[in-house]
Amino acid sequence: MASATAAPSPIQLCVKAAAGDPDTLGDCPFSQRVLLTLEEKKVPYEMKLINVSDKPEWFLEISPEGKVPVLQSHGGEWVPDSDVITQIIEEKYPSPSLVTPPACASVGSKIFPSFVKFLLSNDPSDGSEQALVDELHGLDEHLKEHGPFINGENISAVDLSLAPKLFHMEIALDHFKGWKVPEDLTNLHEYMKLLFNRESFIKTKPTKEHLIAGWAPKVNA
């Protein structure tokens, strides 16, 4: 007998399409963070792939700044910003909980800007490499004490925010600078392996080729 309760309609989400391949999921780490959150909570969703180099008019009407990701709330309004979107998802779908305790919420938060600065730097003496290494050491020490995830045994929102950024760091720095995460950061290496091998990550990650293509214009500017 069919259930009287209709299945919830999938969440509508605008995310970046791959550079040069508008029918394939792109390399935006903030879009992937939202996708990871939906996957971990088993929330049905539909992706609308946005060619960010040629944004359609309908998209600019719902996202005047032209930024992705953008999620359609159950009230019908379109909401930008992965911080806001993931909070909405957490409140609407509280199980399983991905809430990160405040004491852990900012762990690793400076890694992505440090990575970008180092990636785009042409001056080996500007300290950007060491600044990134220092941030990675800090994360490694935290994981040594509290791992395997940032909040211990269970994955939480902070891990889902960091995972795409660490993936970008690993792929882009290896490709453009021949740089790798120092081998002595064993806890960090284990953490990255743990994140990158999760079913949710494998399902939502960009290809290496699309990730590199996404960074190439900035690196070569």
Image (cartoon, rainbow, N blue to C red):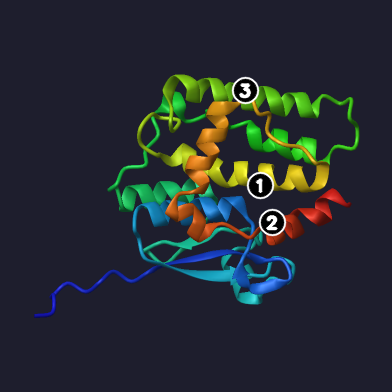
Image-based side of 54 in relation to 164, left or right: right
- Disc 1 + disc 2, Cβ < 8 Å: yes
Q: Residue at x 37, y 64 (%)?
A: 75
Q: Earlier in the sequence, mark 1 or mark 2?
A: 1
Q: Quadrant of the N terminus?
A: bottom left
For mark 3, does the 10 Å Cα neighbourhood hold few (<14), some (14 to 19), or many (20 or more) residues? some
> Which mark, by number, is residue 168?
1
- Taking depth in this image into account, of 94 and 142 the one nearest to the observer is 142
> Can residue 199 be seen in the rendering of this structure?
yes
Type of amino acid under label 2:
Leu
Label 2: few (<14), some (14–19) or many (≥20) C-alpha neighbours in 10 Å: many
User: Residue at image x 37%, y 69%?
Assistant: 10
Residue located beneath label 3 in the image: 137
Quarter assignment of residue 62: bottom right
Q: Which residue is mark 2?
A: 211
Residue 78 seen in this snapshot: no
User: Would you say the residues marked 2 and 3 are in contact, meaning their CB atoms lie under 8 Å apart?
Assistant: no
Local secondary structure at mark 1: helix
Give how far across and how far down residue 130 sits, in percent: 76, 24
Query: How far apart in space, not on screen, are marks 2 and 3 (Cα)?
Result: 25 Å
Disc nearer the start of the sequence (2/3): 3
Between 135 and 84, the one lying in front of the other is 135
Residue with the most extreme bottom position: 1
Q: Residue at x 77, y 48 (%)?
A: 175
Q: Amino acid at mark 1?
A: His
Q: Is residue 145 above or below residue 183?
A: above
Cα separation, mark 3 vs mark 1, equals 18 Å
Name the spot of residue 26 as percent of width and height, x first: 63, 62
Q: Give the CA separation, mark 1 to mark 2.
A: 7 Å
Which amino acid is tagged 3?
Answer: His
Q: Position of residue 49 (x, y in %)?
A: 58, 70
